[in-house]
Every structure is written in C-alpha cells, then in structure tokens.
C-alpha cells in the first residue's frame, strides 16, 4: 500500500493519500486548509488520480479544500450523514477572529462552496474504492458524525484513520457545538478499545501511534478501560 501523509498549511490537520500502488487510483482523506498545492505535488510524483475524498468529520480544518479537490478530479466526497449539514457553510460556525487570521496568513478571502456530489456514510459501511477496502466506524463525540476509517492489509497491520477521535496521548475535544463527552467515551470503549494492539493509528492531528501504545499510556483510554492513570 502507498500511503503519504502531510500536514495542512494551517492548524496542523493531517491530510492522507492512500493507494494500492503508484500509478493508479487513490483516496484522499481530510483535505484541510491550504493543502491543494502539496496534494497536487504528491499526486504528480506518484502518478495518482483521486477516486474519492473521505472526510472523518465536518469541521472546516478537515474539509476546507474538499470542493477544489473533488472538482479538479470530478469525484465525490464521503461523509457521515450526521455531519453532512456541516458542509453547507462551515465558515458560518467559525470564530471571526480565526477567519481573519487565516485570511491574513494566506492573503486571500476565505470562501466556501459545497461539493457537487456528497455521499453519506453509515456505521459498518464497507467501501470498495480505488482498489482499497475501507470499513467505516461511526464514532461520535467530537462531532455527531465523526467516523474512523479502517483498512486491512495482508502484509502490514491494520490501518485506522482516526480523525479527531483519537490522537497520540489524547482524544478530540468535546466542548465544541455538536460535541458529546459521554458519546466520546462510548466511542472509545466500543470502537477504539476493540481494535487490535498492532493497529496503526493515523490521527487527524499529530504523529501516528498504535492502539497498543494508546491502550497502555493514553489516560482517556485507560479511564474508559477501568484503569486510572498512574496506577
């Protein structure tokens, strides 16, 4: 499997490109703010053509470039049904000061246009796209429609793109509109802790980790598992 990850130009959101091999179709996951040029370089270098864009949730820092990426390739965007409303106008929910900061950073006015084709995801969906098989795990808590994408592989451990559900050493915040801390704890118990220790976690922000590492050291997972940090 070919896997390329790189941070967006703002807010440190990880964008991922996945393909069975170079020179063919690929999937783009979470194209955030200012990723288009870097993404184009990655696609050109590896001779890849996007077949779909997968969104772990609807926050603008994970979706900001979805429309130009989808439009350039003529492909659909996939998002959980509970987060589709966030694609209508994510800028409306943003802090005006943050918008102003981004506009100053990039020297252009922040604009938004909804993708032409949006396909909804549901828990347990199995997508056969770009020669890859992707399982969808609905894991609400950070947003109502947060999901994780899992990709099995014969030669390497299973890969889990966890979005803002699970980070190395932490979890996604639940105090934003649509956040739900009890739902997050259920997601951690039912969707994260059930994964094998060898599963490689590619989070929405920060470095990659494994389920085993997080099970042993992540205070939130230890709490959900009935343990207490430091004991």
Image (cartoon, grey):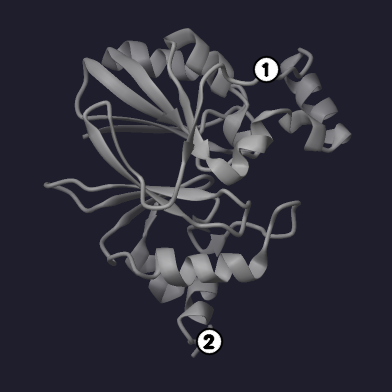
Counting from the top left corner in percent of width and height, residue 92 is at 81, 32
Q: What residue sits right under mark 2 in the picture?
A: 228
Residue hosting label 1: 113
Residue 104 located left or right of residue 23: right
Q: Farthest left residue? A: 155
> In screen coordinates, is 3 left or right of 138?
left
x and y, in percent, of residue 153 in the image: 18, 46
- Outermost residue on the right side: it is 96
Image quadrant assignment for residue 94:
top right
Q: Disc 1 versus disc 2: distance between alpha carbons?
A: 45 Å
Q: Number of numbered discs present?
A: 2
Q: Is residue 129 visible?
A: yes
How far across and down, in percent of the image, does residue 31 sit? Answer: 52, 28
Q: Quadrant of residue 194?
A: bottom left
Please tell me whether mark 2 sits on a helix, a strand or a loop. loop
127 is higher (above) or lower (below) than 191: above
In the image, 136 versus 225, the foreground residue is 136
User: From the image, which quarter does the N terminus lie in?
Assistant: top left
Does residue 162 appear in the picture of this structure? no
Identified at 63% across, 51% down, the residue is 143
Q: Badge 1: few (under 14), some or many (20 or more) residues near its Cα, within 10 Å?
A: some
Of labels 1 and 2, earlier in sequence is 1
Q: Nearer the viewer, mark 1 or mark 2?
A: 1
> SS at mark 1?
loop
Q: Residue at x 45, y 19 (%)?
A: 39
Residue at 60% x, 66% y: name it.
183
Q: Is residue 88 above or below residue 73?
A: below
Tell me residue 102's x, y (percent). 76, 26
- Circle 2 residues within 10 Å: few <14, some 14–19, many ≥20: few
Point out which mark residue 193 bears.
none
Q: Is residue 103 above or below residue 199?
A: above
Which of the 4 image quadrants contains residue 67?
top right
């Amino acid at each position: 499997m070919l896997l390329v990850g790189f941070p967006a130009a703002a807010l440190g959101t990880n964008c991922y490109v996945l393909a069975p091999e170079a020179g063919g179709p690929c999937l783009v996951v979470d194209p955030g703010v200012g990723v288009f040029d870097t993404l184009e370089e990655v696609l050109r270098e590896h001779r890849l053509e996007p077949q779909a864009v997968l969104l772990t949730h609807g926050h603008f820092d994970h979706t900001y470039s979805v429309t130009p990426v989808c439009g350039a390739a003529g492909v659909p965007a996939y998002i959980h049904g509970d987060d589709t409303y966030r694609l209508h106008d994510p800028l409306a929910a943003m802090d005006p000061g943050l918008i102003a900061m981004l506009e100053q950073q990039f020297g252009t006015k922040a604009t938004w246009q909804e993708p032409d084709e949006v396909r909804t995801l549901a828990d347990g969906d199995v997508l056969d796209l770009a020669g890859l098989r992707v399982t969808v795990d609905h894991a609400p808590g950070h947003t109502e429609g947060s999901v994780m994408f899992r990709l099995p592989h014969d030669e390497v451990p299973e890969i889990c793109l966890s979005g803002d559900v699970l980070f190395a050493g932490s979890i996604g915040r639940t105090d934003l509109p649509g956040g739900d801390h009890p739902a997050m704890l259920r997601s951690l118990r039912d969707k994260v802790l059930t994964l094998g220790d060898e599963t490689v976690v590619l989070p929405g922000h920060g470095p990659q980790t494994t389920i085993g590492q997080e099970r042993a050291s992540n205070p939130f997972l230890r709490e959900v598992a009935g343990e207490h940090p430091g004991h």
